[in-house]
Image (spheres, grey):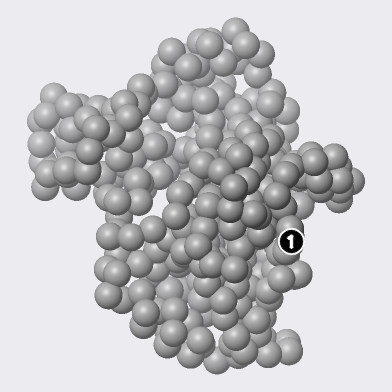
Amino acid sequence: MLSEPDLDLVAALQVAPRAPVAVLAEALGTSSSTVGRRLARLEEQRVLRVIGQVEWSARAEGHPRHVWVTTQPGASGRVARALAELPEAQLVAETSGRSDVYLAVHVPDRARTRELLTERIPGVPGVAGTHSELVLRALTRADAWRLRRLDDAQVDLLSRAADPVEPPAGPLKIGRDEHRVLGLLRENGRITAAEAGRVLGLSQSTTYRLIQSILRRGIVRPRVEVEPVLLGYGLEVTMALTISPGAIQAVAEELARHPSARYVSIVAGTTSVIHQGVFRNEEEMADFLTRDLAPLPGITALQVSVVLRMLRRYWIHREDGLLVP
């Protein structure tokens, strides 16, 4: 688990991932040099990285899919490692409960989805069975999850430094140079216009306008990538809820507001809503199930997959909780 000052920095970056070091320092009541050194250290130790979360329609034709995999006895680790090498695999985890391996995949071309789901994933040696569901709508994603460590004044100061996002007026249209900038923001959510301009051979002013356009339209949403276990959340789960049709939207919205929610989506399949949540311990999760989830209307079934080991998240490989370069 990270130190208290490190956790404060993570919380500040969650509010304003691209905020200048001086603004982060002011919000945290310390010096810019201290914040700069701390951020550099966390990055060097592979604990933390600010990346760009790309809007689905800018990555592919369709939406992601959740896939649950059962394996032959003793094969879950080997299967999980093989699935983590799939270029379409956004998230891969070895789990217990509903499945032995859980993954989220996003296929750039709809025509290749059938091949991935019916041939390539089931064809991995050791796979005994698979089940997949299509994401219809996401109500919250990882960029919105927050550590509750900052007071209102700190959040207000940081929010003013955050990049404003305008609701899309229609289908996203992305030019050639915007695509090039998008690729850099995806890898480094804090990249400056000067740095991006040097890489792309564009002027700083042109690159600045491209970055601001991409951020303002929500094509890329910068976010802090750090494993929850390092933040004190030792229990991560994926819950698949079956809900009566009339209550799906209301339940999904309520779950999206819960402090545990890193990702909540409405899906098409045997279940209705997927809730990916993090908890500090088993007692906290028990409170969620019995106190927060139980009163919600229309829930008829619940299946839980508990993460045993995270191998890949948002296309970044993990090793013992650290980010693999």
Residue 234 in picture, x, y percent from top left? 77, 50
**Number of numbered discs on residues:** 1
Q: Is residue 188 left or right of residue 244?
A: left
Identity of the residue furthest to the top in this view: 153
Say if residue 251 shows up in the picture: yes
* Residue displayed at 25% across by 27% down: 212
Against 19, residue 134 (above or below) is below
Q: Nearer the viewer, residue 89 or 232?
A: 89
- Tell me the kind of residue under disc 1: Ala
User: Seen in the image, is 24 located left or right of residue 207?
Assistant: right
For image coordinates 50% across by 62% down, the residue present is: 268
The N terminus, quarter of image: top right
From where the camera sits, is residue 280 visible? no
For image coordinates 51% across by 10% down, the residue present is 157
Is residue 297 found left or right of 167 in the rendered image?
right
Q: Is residue 122 above or below residue 200?
A: below
Label 1: how many Cα within 10 Å (few below 14, some 14–19, many 20+):
few
Q: Nearer the viewer, residue 312 or 33?
A: 312
Residue that label 1 marks = 301
Residue 26, image x, y percentages:
53, 10
**Could you tell whether 199 is left or right of 256 in the image?**
left
The residue at the far right in this view is: 283
Q: Residue at x 19, y 47 (%)?
A: 179
Percent coordinates x, y for residue 152 in the rendering: 62, 11
Q: Nearer the viewer, residue 320 or 265?
A: 265
